[in-house]
Image (spheres, grey):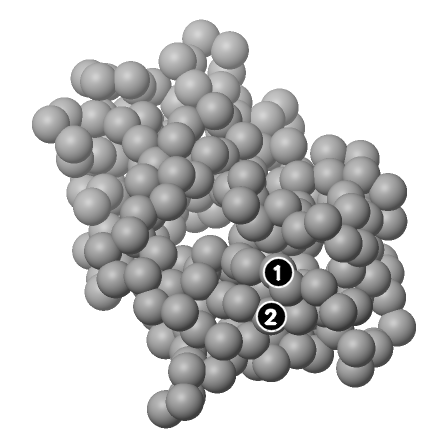
Amino acid sequence: DEGVNTFGGNTENKIIFPKGTSDDFLGEITLKNGEVYFKNTKNVKILHNNDLVNEIRIYPYRENGKPTILEHKTLRWFIIKRGDKFAIRLRDLESPILKNFTGIETFKIDSTYKIQAKFIPTEGKKIAILDVTGQVSQQDSPGTLVFKLNGKEHRLDALSEGDELFIIFGDKTNKKETYGAGRFLYAQKPDNQGNVTLDFNKATNPPCAFTPYATCPLPPKQNQLSVEIKAGEKNYGHH
């Protein structure tokens, strides 16, 4: 919330860290005019880049767009912004979910799902992306990928992520063999002829397949494929 937010393991804090993982009072996180600051008010051991820290701005990020991560015992956290809301993304290196992780089941690799697509530029186009928190953002889409599978034509709107294309898609395996809210796929940007290789064998689960605390984007309506994509990662857990 705007203003001062106390945090730590004690229930008297405004933001309560999980019981048994944190000292009672870790300090204050202050949100003011879109910037977030940490202040160590109890002289507890809080680290940033292995150095003890008492006061630091933790949003916007300080180091080339990388999150400013604070550490306490086995906990690691940083600030995220979703729409106009701010939150703490907290990780526990000793989390039972992490310690009990045994891997992700996948479909057998099938060359049928390594497909050549045509990239149709859509410069200036924005698509609405809904996330699991219910917030909608308008994101730039550099182009649409058109391809054939089982003799039928399909289309996927792509987003840009660094030097790659990022595709959020759903298919008829969702809620059965694969995660109910769709999967992610990355692809190289088009070659000189406008061709893109879509290898669905590399389709991955979004973070919200593993934890209820992620803020994953959901496939836009036009990216819900009318076929089964029996390739890539299968479902994991029950989130």
Of residue 129 and residue 45, the one placed in the foreground of this image is: 129
For the residue pair 211 and 216, the one nearer the viewer reads as 216
Asked if residue 57 is positioned above or below residue 165 in the image, the reply reads: above
Say above or below: 43 vs 46: above
What residue appears at the point 34 percent right and 19 percent down from the top-left corner? 6
Circle 1 SS class: strand
> Can residue 141 be seen here?
yes
Q: Position of residue 237 (x, y in %)?
A: 81, 41
Query: How far across and down, in percent of the image, does residue 48 sit?
Result: 33, 53
Q: Above or below — where is 62 with respect to 74?
A: below
- The circle drawn on residue 154 is 1
Q: Which mark is residue 178?
A: none
State the residue in front, 160 or 37.
160
The local crowd at label 2, few if under 14, some if 14 to 19, many if 20 or more residues have their Cα within 10 Å, is some
Relative placement, left or right, of 183 versus 1 is right
**Distance of mark 1 from mark 2, alpha carbons?**
5 Å
The disc labelled 1 sits on which kind of residue? His
- Is disc 1 in contact with disc 2, using a CB cutoff of under 8 Å? yes
Q: Residue at x 78, y 47 (%)?
A: 172
Q: Secondary structure at mark 2?
A: strand
Query: What is the number of the mark on residue 147?
Result: 2
Neighbour class for label 1 at 10 Å: few (<14), some, many (≥20)?
Answer: some
Residue 94 in the figure: left or right of residue 127:
right
Residue at image point 73% right, 34% down: 239
Three-letter code for the amino acid on which mark 2 is drawn: Phe
Instruction: Please state the horizontal and vertical placement of residue 66, each as a whole percent of the image.
Output: 31, 59
Q: Is residue 40 visible?
A: no
Q: Earlier in the sequence, mark 1 or mark 2?
A: 2
Q: Nearer the viewer, residue 123 or 16?
A: 123
Q: Quadrant of the N terminus?
A: top left
Q: Which residue of the protein is positioned furthest toward the top in this rendering?
A: 12
Q: Quadrant of residue 113?
A: bottom right
